[in-house]
Image (cartoon, coloured by chain):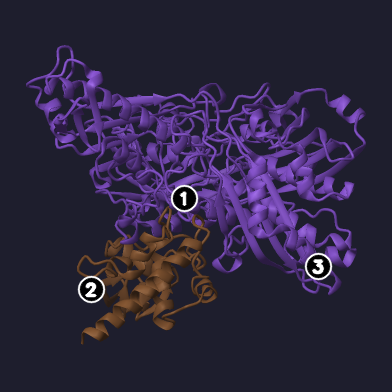
Chain colours: A purple, B brown
Amino acid sequence: MGKKFVGEPIPRVEDHRLITGRSQYVDDIVRPRMVYAAILRSIYAHARLKAVNVEKARQAPGVIAVFTGADVREAIGPVPVASRLPDLKIPKHPVLALEKVHYVGEPIAVVVAGDRYLARDAVDMIEVEYEPLEAVVDPERAIAEGAPIVHEEFGTNVAFVWRLSGGDIERAFREADVVVSQRMVNQRLIPVAMEPRGVVAEYLPGEGQLTVWTSTQIPHLLRTQLATMLGLAENRLRVIAPEVGGGFGSKLNVYAEEALVGYLAMRLGRPVKWIETRRENFLSTTHGRGQIAEVEAAVKRDGTVLGLRYKIIQDLGAYHQLLTPAIPTLTGLMATGPYKIPNLHVQIVGAFTNKMATDAYRGAGRPEATYWLERMMDRIAGELGLDPVQVRMRNFPQPEEFPFPTASGLAYDSGNYHQALRRAMELVGYEKLRQEQQQLRQQGRYLGIGISTYVEICALGPSPALPAGGWESATVRVEPTGKVTVLTGASPHGQGQETAFAQIVADELGVELADVRVIHGDTAIVQYGIGTFGSRATAVGGTAVYGALQKVKEKATHLAAHLLGEENVANVAFEDGHFFLKDNPERRMTFHEVALAAYLAKNLPPGVEPGLEATYFFEPSNFTFPFGAHIAVVEVDPETGDVQFRRYVAVDDCGRVLNPLLVDGQVHGGIVQSLGQALLEEAVYDESGQLVTGELTEYAIPKATDVPWLETDRTETPSPVNPLGIKGVGEAGTIAATPAIVNAVLDALAPFGVQHLDMPLRPEKIWRAIRGA
Amino acid sequence: MGRTIEVTINGLLYRHDVEPRLLLVHYLRDVIGLTGTHIGCETSLCGACTVLFNGAAVKSCTLFAVQADGAEITTIEGLAENGQLHPIQEGFWMKHGLQCGYCTPGMILAAHQLLSRSPDPSEEEIRRGIEGNLCRCTGYQHIIEAIRYAAEKIRVTREGGARSK
């Protein structure tokens, strides 16, 4: 056998352009005669727009045009929401505000000028007359009687009530020895991709084609939606996601600015660029999380959990963005986590508030589910006087119970939850740590050990479960010289699929990595695809590549048999880039020779088309369910409330691993985003709806000095859902780590009688809790 | 128009008339066309715009172009010599020190300053040395390994060079 690439820690093929400064992000794109847009945004959270006077701005130096909501209302359709829940209230969402503004940062007018400085100068010259209205910021207040109403036409701030039941929840509580309850908050977060959003649009009047370069995770889905918003034929619209500087769900959307800039380019007949400032990114790119939950667990004295009841309020913000209402339903689906809990009831109330919309943020509903449940497991252990490990082990399903049906109606594909937790305990030295914890407590030192065992729903997903289809596409094109071009419908933006997919191709076709080029993110080049989110790009998109490769190999084998004069195709083998006869291996041809013959087409078998390429659309039969166990060890300083990490151990099972370097990178990044939520980050709006944490000065994302050394390990349980056995890994760290860290801090605080604290666990909050004890 | 400035960028001397309010980062990106230097916040907090300014790592979003008059600037495009990657670039590649790549040029130049001041930094020193540069993708661990790789590579190259003399 020759060289194998799958499974090896191959450095990324995409890196060279990135480390030499030669990649092209949206703001790096320059078009002839390009002009710049800047946007005036609301400074009030809730107000009537009495007047928007743009005359001075129109006269300002360098200004080419100014448009308000009234100017574009006929030309540009509303910002879309794809989720459809029963009785969902959908407010009108114009790209520029009309009669009212509903959150600070809502776009009101757009200026186009010859350079970006002049455009911003002119924005300041627009005079807006507001009639301020009382804002509603707190989602619990929003759904209470007498709250200000965000959208008057509904007469309520309740956008939806969604319920999910399984088993017999009443019976579970009747049969319980103990009921453990906890109210908890999953605070609002701001994704903060390092590259803010940005759009460049150019209209070619001769072709009648609009090209939109935008920092997005979903170029094809965006194209369909933009075509509708702009009234363009979809085949006259080309969306290009160039290099994208991080997304984390915040670019899994259709934004007002994407349609607006496209419109401006057509209307003005010049290419237009708009680049979001970081301040705008905080105000008007989707936020994440924002759930409040009251959870009740019905438990037996031995730790068996009979049932769970959740009452959840989701802070939606003022409008629905693309998937806003769907995100908390993922929390509901995953509400029993990695445990055999047969009875479940979930109620989720979606509340409009005068804030930016929440939507997908790395994990999207699943970190919330894992956080609620993993906090509950520790609360249960505390109430019953059991070790947190014991409670978890008692409730795990056995490996032979997979596919494992949940009370929420899912079927977990494969798993061995005991093994992952045991491995994490071994690595961290759990028993010894517990002893050390006891000794340290006697010296007035507070060590905390926090466990999180998780399962996530990934490889989104079967098409019936997603608004726009859950398949993925790939074309594998073997060029006449034997080079291989892959067109993937996934849209990676840092995850490394140019490398991972090239590894699959190299192994399947026996070519070198350097012979493979993976192209993505251009709707004029790549066949329709779904995009990159929900830990799906490799599990679904990689499988599509694999499927297309099988079709290519089948055709090439057929052709090779013909060229080798062999009537029995089954007698032709393909290994290490060579076709040969099994019973006469001397009779052989290289893959390159077969590829060239396919194009020269001088000697093809009857009925065989020239060329050598195949397209495959992979529809998964189920989601995949990665899982694992994380253990955080911290020490809390009782004098200051400061949290110091001692250890962090992560054992993740993402199914088959294509490239361990990439998997580690995903896990590290996810854990650190979790650490941000657990200890540092919180989007804070004041009572009037001003975003207090509206810049990196006030919103702390983790720095290198905030992060401990992460010890990662894996178990590898292949998924039966796809032929490569991949489960996915993009969100695992973010889903697992938050409760591990919070559980560790609260474990450290146990001697003070502190049962729960809401995130972020900053020193002051911990210090006050210790003092209050 | 504004003032005339002369700036050496990646070894080439440029002379331009610039508006006094033009930020150095916009000068590098929009006037010179070196778009490897990125803008992540415009408030000097994220470090994506870090360049070497007379050898020191500075955030080019909070300097005016006119302040660079007479300065020598190195951007990410100027780090590789004769097509040979700098050991820090190589370290980021080999150790998977980047994902989306947006913070990477600034991070590499911050690491450059760190290694010029401390050729064999500990993990703690590396963390402090890149504290002013934010990365949302990697969790920093592979960046630390990348910088260690570079430190080692530079050390071996120097010693090898010394021996061959």
Question: How far is mark 2 from mark 3, CA to CA?
Answer: 56 Å
Residue at 51%, 28% (x, y): give it.
A721
Query: Comparing marks 2 and 1, which lies closer to the viewer?
Result: 1
Question: How far is mark 1 from mark 3, CA to CA?
Answer: 35 Å
Extreme residue toward the front, this view = A583
The quadrant of the rendering that contains the N terminus of chain A is top left
Label 2 lies in what chain? B
Type of amino acid under label 2:
Tyr
| Image marks 2 and 3: residues in contact by CB distance under 8 Å | no
Q: Position of residue B68 (x, y in %)?
A: 34, 77
Q: Secondary structure at mark 2?
A: strand
Type of amino acid under label 1:
Gly
At label 3, counting other C-alpha atoms closer than 10 Å, the crowd grade (few under 14, some 14-19, many 20 or more) is some
Type of amino acid under label 3:
Trp
The answer to whether residue A693 is visible is no
Given residues B11 and B83, the one toward you in this image is B83
The quadrant of the rendering that contains the C terminus of chain A is bottom right
| Image marks 2 and 1: residues in contact by CB distance under 8 Å | no
- Judge left or right: residue A212 versus residue A208: right
On whether disc 2 and disc 1 are found on a single subunit, the reply is no
For residue A767, the mark is 3
Residue at 27%, 35% (x, y): give it.
A509
Write down the residue under mark 2: B14
Write down the residue under mark 1: A246
On whether disc 2 and disc 3 are found on a single subunit, the reply is no
